[in-house]
Image: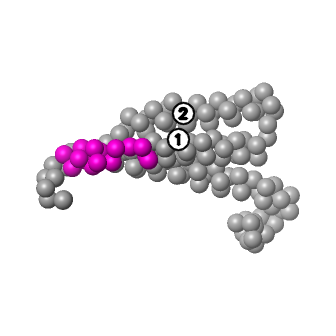
Amino acid sequence: FVPLQEVLLGVVTNDRGLRDRAATLIPAVLVSTYLNLVVDNITAGVFAGMGRPVIATVLSFGLELPMMIGASALYIIKFHGNLLGVYWLQAGIGGFEVVVVLIIMTISNWDKYAQKARKRQEVPVESLE
């Protein structure tokens, strides 16, 4: 985005002030969105595919929502933060969540969950070996 920001933002608006504001916000928005996309793909994709929807639910309601909403509210109310700060805060939280879900994914017993998935799909174990 950075090398083409003038061209890309020029397509959207010709207001210089708006383009300058967007140029500062968009990198934070993109980083935050990308990190949260990684978290969503692992929780909704990998963990659900492993047959572990409870972990996805616990992470969503016990970690992601409280941290995103709570930290953003604290940042705005207590520290009188701005929009750019909120996006960078959410990017930081997203980075922390990526680390958490990658650790859980890495230490998971893949053989155990593969066996459970085969059993759920009623696939004979011998036919896959």
Q: Depth-wise, is mark 1 or mark 2 nearer the camera?
A: 1
Q: With 19 as the anchor, is 118 left or right in this view?
A: left
Residue identifier under label 1: 100
Q: Secondary structure at mark 1?
A: helix
126, above or below 11, in the image: above
Q: With 66 as the anchor, is 23 left or right in this view?
A: right
The answer to whether the residues at label 1 and label 2 have Cβ atoms under 8 Å apart is yes
Residue type indicated by callout 2:
Leu
Secondary structure mainly formed by the magenta segment: helix
Q: Secondary structure at mark 2?
A: helix
Residue identifier under label 2: 63
Depth check: give the residue in front, 107 or 84. 107
45, above or below 67, in the image: below
* In magenta segment, residue 77: no
Q: Which residues are magenta?
A: 105-119
Residue 77, horizontal then vertical, whole percent: 76, 28
Residue 58, horizontal then vertical, whole percent: 45, 32
